[in-house]
Amino acid sequence: MPSDSIEEWAAQQDLRSEVRRLSKTLAREREQRIRLEETITLAARAAFSSWETPAIPKPTRDPRTRTEEICVALCSDWHYGAVTADYNREVCEQRVGRYADKILSLTEIQRADHPVRVVRLWVLGDLVGGEQIFSGQEHEIDASLVEQSFGVGRLLSDLTLRLAAGFDKVHVVCLPGNHGRIGGKTMPYSPDTNADRIAYMIAQERTREPRVTWQIARADTPGETGRIVVDQIGSYSCLLTHGELFRGGGYGGLPWYQFWKKAMAWRDMSTAGQIPPFDDLACGHWHRTSSIEIGTMTLRVCGTLQTYDPFSREQIAAATTPAQSLLFVHPDKGVTAEYRVLLG
């Protein structure tokens, strides 16, 4: 036999021996694993042999005996009359109708646990798109300011009456936005002259119903400035403003520093008795839904009905998702639930 054949035969014998050795080792390991599993199983059975599963009672909650809460729907930055690649007055009306549907459906979820008989609408401004608010706006709207005011008045009154069919009472609190301004910032008009406010008054006239009440902010009302209102729900209160009073930019399209600075300053003013005390804040203007903790307060920012709007795309460089905010408020405990209601 040639020497290379002998060497090959010897190598094969070594491989066969190694295979037999590894097979025996694997068998021993498998046997040990099986014994270990059996030991663990027996130990577990012994440990739980005397275990008694406690009886779990069925829930017996009765919504009629639980504390009533208030539904709070935030409306902001509809920009009725504005035109973008996928937004116009028809889309605006569709999204307002979708918002009404979702308010009612989300309220039914809450009613499974407790009564919700009252809804409050916090209308935070810029429901009109405006006219001559910025240079070139005439190319981005399809309705005059008069048409916008009457269109928003009709839309807001329809939303209010739709909610009145699902709640025992509707209370609407309204503030103007900067897009309701008539003419430039230096025009010599009354601080109450605002197209948003005109739309609110139209909606109020269209909802002459005892179960619907209105509070339209005015500059000459004690405790208000026309652009700041503190709404009281039981022992809980929230400062409402449109949002343009928070000057400056920031990260993600929100002026974080100004939020803190202004909120703390208003809290000091409330301590001094210059404005009513408040627990939280709510605003619009910034075209995105956010919830920001500021000390012991929470600032909730309501979104917009628009998509791809020039303000978000060019001024604050942040993506926009059509959405509004919905809260449920306990009269003693404050906000117990909040929703970002998507409407795109």
Image (cartoon, rainbow, N blue to C red):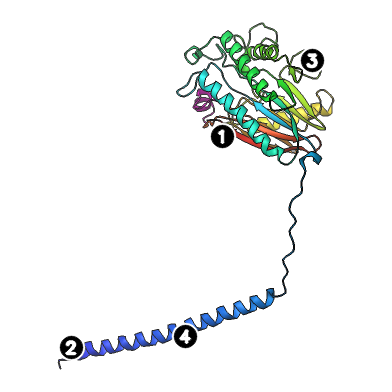
Magenta residues, as a range?
305-317
Q: Position of residue 78 (x, y in %)?
A: 58, 22
Q: Residues within 10 Å of mark 4 (few under 14, many from 20)?
A: few
Of the residues shown, which amino acid type is indicated by label 3? Thr
Give the labeled residue for mark 3. 221
Mark 2 or 4, nearer chain start: 2
**The stretch drawn in magenta includes residue 309:** yes
User: Mark 3 and mark 1: span between their CA atoms?
Assistant: 35 Å
Q: Residue at x 51, y 24 (%)?
A: 309
Mark 4 or 3, nearer chain start: 4
* Residue 159: mark in rendering: none
Side of 319 where 265 appears, left or right: right
Outermost residue on the top side: it is 188
Residue 270 in sight here: yes
User: Mark 4 and mark 3: span between their CA atoms?
Assistant: 89 Å
Which is closer to the viewer, label 2 or label 4?
4
Which is closer to the viewer, label 1 or label 4?
4
Q: Residues within 10 Å of mark 2 (few under 14, many from 20)?
A: few
Give the labeled residue for mark 1. 252
Give the labeled residue for mark 4. 28
| Element marked by disc 1 | helix
Of the residues shown, which amino acid type is indicated by label 1? Gly
Residue 332, image quadrant: top right
Mark 3 or 1, nearer chain start: 3
Residue 283 in sight here: no
Of the residues shown, which amino acid type is indicated by label 2? Asp
